[in-house]
């Protein structure tokens, strides 16, 4: 049963004057029963660690994301959290094109919403806003919105795939650079060989 | 007012643009806007009307709101706003996005996950929090005063960065990357990775030629 008393007074945080990463981590670490996240991008390792700890402590963690780092998803699901990612192919043409939400609900008593995304640059460098509120009106509306999204067909389960670190490595600039260096060495060796023979 | 009067709107919604227009139209004293992206073609006219009613208008926007092409309607709206006495400043930084979506209209605050442009009204999942809470409004007002460039900086006709990285619209417009250059870069697609791959391919061809010529010789 939800407490219908007025909740925690709202506070607005700006990245110019607050450490937003700390604010987000504090909100997450205050969870006792449930964390519901609906976010555009979930890539932060610090947020992942906080959610993993919460999940390990018995807090129910569900993440709905537009994009989620595969390693983060794998760690979260490994810790018992549920991760769902937006799949635009499940949406009719002309309908929703992007999952751009930035909402965290903790224990149905605190909501954190604003412009900040859950990746490092957004949490620590960019100009961002975050409102943390216990307003019942906001919480009730946010909870209904979140439940609707959680039941949406376009949110597919994720986090069970193997990490694609090898694929990323093979396509990465370092490998290309190394291959180029080897190839240039071969060129030089051939040229040297030809010169010596000549 | 306290937070129990706050309301949240969710997009996609066909009524959001009307809600934002009503918010601007209701302004009697001031509009302070800090926005990553705003469609000035849509929201310029009601802002101009607000100026004509004697409302003080201050806009801080990210450089990504600057249109690519000279003479676009958005640019002329920004110039019109400046001409009518509004402060329109552009945040320029390669490393840091000015990603705020905050608007303070008199004693009401609107903060959102969505920018003030399409597709954020009708085709994205976004939230829009409207609050008249005294604490939130007061804190936002103090923040805006803190980050807003001084009038002298805002009206300077030269490319001098304020401590927060803001430039007047007209100056920012003059010093943007020419759209033709951007277009060329896009067309050429000269990313580092592609350049490396091309160099690797060339080098491999050279190797192959050397091997073939060696064998033939």
Image: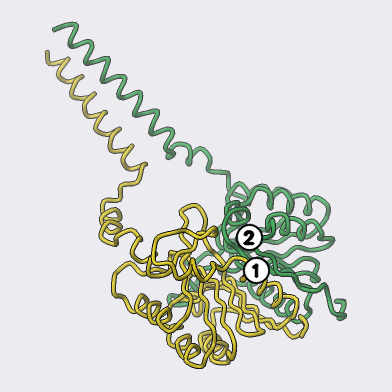
| Front-most of residues B15 and A144 | B15
Q: Colour of chain A?
A: green
Q: Which of B5 and B212 is in front in this view?
A: B5
Residue drawn at (59%, 57%), measured in percent from left and top?
Answer: A122
Q: Which chain carries label 2?
A: A
Label 2 residue SS: loop
| Quadrant in which residue A65 is drawn | bottom right
Numbered circle sitting on residue B143: 1
- Residue pointed to by mark 2: A16
In the rendered image, residue B152, in percent from the top left (x then y), is placed at 49, 68
Q: Callout 1: few (<14), some (14-19), or many (20+) C-alpha neighbours within 10 Å?
A: some
Q: In this view, does A193 lie to the left or right of B21?
A: left
| SS state under label 1 | helix
Quadrant location of the N terminus of chain A in the rendered image: bottom right
Dot label at residue A48: none
Chain drawn yellow in the picture:
B
**How is the model colour-coded?**
by chain
Residue B198 % position (x, y): 28, 38
Q: Give a yes or no on whether discs 2 and 1 share a subunit.
A: no
B171 to the left or right of A130: left
| Quadrant hosting residue B155 | bottom left
Could you tell whether B192 is left or right of A6 in the image?
Answer: left
Chain under callout 1: B
Q: Is residue A28 above or below residue A105?
A: above
Question: Where's residue A32, x and y in %?
Answer: 84, 60
User: How many numbered callouts?
Assistant: 2
Q: Nearer the viewer, residue A146 or B32?
A: B32
Which residue is rendered at x = 42% and y = 78% of the image? B82
**Quarter-of-image position of residue A133:** bottom right
Find out whether the residues at labels 2 and 1 contact each other: C-beta distance under 8 Å.
yes
User: Which residue is drawn at the image coordinates 69% and 65% (left, top)?
Assistant: A13
């Amino acid at each position: 049963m939800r407490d219908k008393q007025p909740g925690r007074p709202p506070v607005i945080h700006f990245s110019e004057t607050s450490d937003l990463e700390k604010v987000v981590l504090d909100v997450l670490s205050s969870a006792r029963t449930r964390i519901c996240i609906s976010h555009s991008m979930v890539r932060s390792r610090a947020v992942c660690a906080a959610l993993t700890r919460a999940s390990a402590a018995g807090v129910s963690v569900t993440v709905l994301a537009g994009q989620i780092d595969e390693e983060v998803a794998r760690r979260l699901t490994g810790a018992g959290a549920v991760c769902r990612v937006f799949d635009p192919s499940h949406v009719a043409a002309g309908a929703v094109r992007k999952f751009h939400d930035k909402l965290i609900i903790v224990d149905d008593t605190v909501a954190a919403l604003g412009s900040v995304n859950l990746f490092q640059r957004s949490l620590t460098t960019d100009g961002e806003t975050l409102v943390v509120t216990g307003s019942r009106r906001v919480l009730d509306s946010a909870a209904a919105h979140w439940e609707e999204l959680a039941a949406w067909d376009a949110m597919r389960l994720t986090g069970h795939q193997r990490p694609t670190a090898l694929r990323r490595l093979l396509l990465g600039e370092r490998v290309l650079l190394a291959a180029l260096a080897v190839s240039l060495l071969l060129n030089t060796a051939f040229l040297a060989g030809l010169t010596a023979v000549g | 007012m306290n937070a129990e009067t706050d309301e949240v709107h969710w997009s996609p919604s066909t009524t959001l643009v009307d809600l934002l227009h009503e918010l601007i139209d209701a302004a009697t004293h001031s509009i302070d806007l800090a926005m990553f992206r705003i469609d000035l073609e849509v929201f310029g006219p009601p802002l101009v009307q607000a100026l004509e009613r004697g409302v003080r208008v201050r806009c801080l926007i990210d450089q990504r709101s600057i249109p690519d092409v000279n003479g676009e309607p958005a640019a002329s709206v920004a110039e019109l706003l400046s001409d009518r006495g509004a402060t329109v400043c552009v945040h320029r930084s390669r490393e840091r996005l000015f990603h705020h979506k905050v608007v303070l209209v008199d004693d009401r605050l609107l903060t959102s996950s969505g920018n003030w442009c399409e597709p954020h009204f009708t085709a994205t999942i976004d939230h829009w929090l409207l609050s008249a809470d005294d604490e939130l409004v007061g804190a936002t007002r103090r923040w805006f005063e803190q980050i807003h460039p001084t009038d002298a900086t805002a009206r300077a006709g030269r490319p001098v960065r304020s401590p927060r990285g803001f430039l007047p619209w007209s100056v920012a417009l003059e010093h943007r990357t020419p759209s033709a250059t951007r277009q060329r870069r896009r067309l050429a697609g000269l990313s580092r990775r592609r350049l490396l791959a091309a160099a690797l391919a060339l080098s491999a061809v050279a190797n192959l030629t050397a091997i073939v010529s060696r064998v033939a010789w």
